[in-house]
Amino acid sequence: MGSASGRYLITLNGEVYNYASLRAELESQGAAPAWRGHSDTEVLLAAIEAWGLRRALERSVGMFALALWDRAQRRLSLARDRAGEKPLYYGRVGRAFLFGSELKALRAYPEFYAEIDRGCLALFLRHNYVPEPLSIYRGIQRVPAGTILEVDESGRHGEPVTYWSLANSAGPAATRAFTASEHEVVETLERVLGEAVGLQMVADVPLGAFLSGGIDSSLIVALMQQRSARRVRTFTIGFSEPDYDESRYARDVARHLGTDHTELIVTPAEAMQVIPRLATIYDEPFADSSQIPTHLVAQLARQHVTVSLSGDAGDELFGGYNRYAWAKRVSNSVRFLGPFRGVAARSIRRLSPETWTRMAGLGSRLLPRRWRETRAGDKLHRIADLLDSSPGGIYRALISHWPTPADLVIDGREPSSQLTEMMAHSSSRRFEEDMMFWDFMTYLPGDILVKVDRAAMAVSLETRVPMLDHRVIEFAWSLPLSLRVHNGSGKWLLKELLSRYVPATLTDRPKMGFGIPIDSWLRGPLRDWAESLLDESRLRSEGFLHPAPIREKWLEHVSGRRNWAYLLWDVIMFQSWLEEQARRPANGDDDRESTERSPISRESVSSRRYGNA
């Protein structure tokens, strides 16, 4: 779209939620053009003309990636929303400067040369995603969240310039005195989060919400229903395996709130039919296995609505991950044991992981199955590895998949990342707050938001995340840790607010997550498909990964001796992505629809092109 004066041209992917108030402000200042329509894009262009790009973005509330061409200065500006909800890649290829929402958009350039970055491959195997601002391709990066990148007409550019960052917002809050009562804090959260929900409910298309029955999604739906004159549409999927099925919890919450609820119980066969499309949907190696149910619930929602709100980011902002309390206990134990840490580690290692798991199983048969410790032996051996670690090292070990991934990659050297750079600098925060900060800066944009955005865009569903309104983020980080993690319980403040709408008996239960039984599937219906991707001769001929450690893990897994699903899935997803790249030429010359390789039956799966605009 062009601006009213003709100076600017913009391409915008996403939404500016507060465009109506920006429009009114422009009009009150006499800075409004003769409006041609009612879109947020037109308002943002007018704001840029009146205030400049940076000031316009600072006053905008939304999720977006944009490219702005300034005809007067012959300059391109690329920018991304504060939290990084929408993707934006860029890089030089020969004499050309390319940018786009997806890597496949860049690959369509006729002279695109895609060299896989082996260092980024090592990072992927550590994290199960390629961390920002890197990409799997050498020389192709992502515009960091909350920044503007300026490019001159010859394609030269400097470093991205920050217009908003959590570091700047969270830093001053840690030093301020906090005097509000708990009641006042809950009231403020209800107002701030409620305003964000109300703003994101504005849409001229059908709107709904994902509902798992957990704390975060239940709170978002409760605030939506409070603001809606009609029943809110809510969606959940369940699984036939009881250990992975949360649909009954979502059903109870929906009934209590009075939503118009839709659920779908998915069979393993239906879930596995998504797997052949994952490489196309995610467009880059990505191995969070909850990508499968996320895509399925987005697909279900899209049959009824065009926009769906989600409860993502509650864990990172309000201390919800189990690893926060777990890592603190390990860190305290490390300090308590002092010089005896080595003795404790050796004592744990005297028994194999299988023996520890068997002993834990014998001691927990009287407990409900979902409460029993899984992979107890693996976790104890991981504790042994952590006993010699610093707090930062404990966190890094907890979020790592392959502990030394560079050893797995042929000619691989793991580069420094945003995480290692942040961990190298001391902070005044407590260990749990450091972990939450690191998660917000790395895991949230690299895994959680990528997972939801790509899964939804694959079916043309727009997702919105009220907790990532920057005012909610800044409020959360203004709070003392005790109001987020209270007596060892995470998300205390969210639970207090939710109790005003939903009885605690409906939501107070152990965190289940959005998992699927990948471990058993790899031993059963996915075994032949995975075996073909992990074939030793194939790995050797491709030349990216050393076959020996992969084959060792694979044989141990299929035998049932160990559960290596979370490591093997990383390799399988890279192999599947690599296969997809070979099938689709980089320059896009071959637009023919290909037959996807299905782990169940090749005939039952048809291929489609997916992605962001």
Image (tube, rainbow, N blue to C red):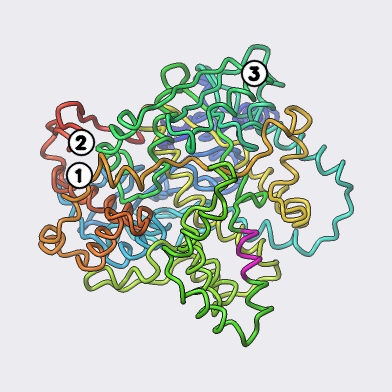
599 vs 162: above or below:
above
**At which x and y percent is residue 426?**
63, 75
Q: Which mark is residue 60?
A: none
Front residue (pair 41, 100): 100
Q: Which residues are magenta?
A: 324-330
Q: Label 1 amino acid?
A: Trp
Q: Which mark is residue 255?
A: 3
Front residue (pair 385, 392): 385
* Distance CA(mark 3)–CA(mark 1): 41 Å
Circle 2 residues within 10 Å: few <14, some 14–19, many ≥20: some
**At which x and y percent is residue 230?**
64, 12
Query: Which of the image's four quarters has the C terminus?
Result: top left
* Mark 3–mark 1 CB contact (< 8 Å): no
119 vs 257: above or below:
below
Asked whether residue 136 is drawn in magenta, I would say: no
**At which x and y percent is residue 343?**
56, 84
- Which residue is denoted by mark 2 in the rendering? 598
Q: Earlier in the sequence, mark 1 or mark 2?
A: 1
Q: Secondary structure at mark 3?
A: helix
